[in-house]
Amino acid sequence: MKFWIGFHLGATVSGFVVASLDADERQRLARRVKQAAVTGRSGEIASSISNGVGDIADVATDRVTTAVGTATSSVAEALEDTGSSTVNPG
């Protein structure tokens, strides 16, 4: 209930202030509001990109981890099949 009282009071005061502005002040206010809206959209776009990059990084990390695990298991199985416990690099 307190929220709505504050909301209505703020809307009423804002309406009174805007109604008492002359044409130049209204244009300046409109530019500032538009700039704030663009800045907010830019922040949303940056956030979306950041989230997308994070999602891609998570998937890539999972795939690399899976690939390394598979490769490690394959090498271990190959070594067991040959009966060797050491790898001879040369």
Image (cartoon, rainbow, N blue to C red):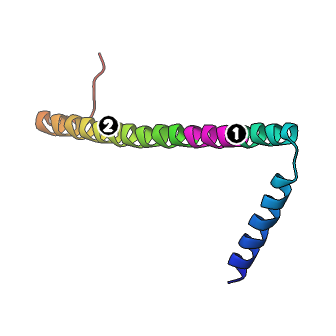
Q: Nearer the viewer, residue 72 or 30?
A: 30
Instruction: Find the magenta span and give its range.
Output: 36-46
What residue is at 82 percent from the left and 54 percent from the top?
A: 19
What residue is at 87 percent from the left and 41 percent from the top?
A: 25
Q: Residue furthest top?
A: 90
- The amino acid sitting under disc 2 is Val
- Vertical relation: 89 (above or below) 44: above
> In the rendered structure, does residue 10 fall within the stretch colored magenta?
no
Give the image location of residue 36, x and y in percent.
72, 42
Q: Are marks 1 and 2 in contact (CB under 8 Å)?
A: no
Q: CA distance from mark 1 to mark 2?
A: 51 Å
Residue corresponding to mark 2: 68
Give the image location of residue 87, x and y in percent.
28, 28
- The amino acid sitting under disc 1 is Lys
Residue corresponding to mark 1: 34
Q: Quadrant of residue 90?
A: top left
Report the magenta stretch's main SS: helix
What residue is at 78 percent from the left and 59 percent from the top?
A: 15
> In the rendered structure, does residue 45 fall within the stretch colored magenta?
yes
Badge 2 marks a residue whose secondary structure is: helix
Badge 1 marks a residue whose secondary structure is: helix
Q: Nearer the viewer, residue 19 or 43?
A: 19
Q: Nearer the viewer, residue 15 or 60?
A: 15
Q: Quadrant of residue 33?
A: top right
Which label lies toward us, 1 or 2?
1
Q: Nearer the viewer, residue 32 or 28?
A: 28
Give the image location of residue 21, x and y in percent.
87, 48
Give the side of residue 86 with respect to residue 34, left or right.
left
Give the quarter of the figure containing the N terminus. Answer: bottom right
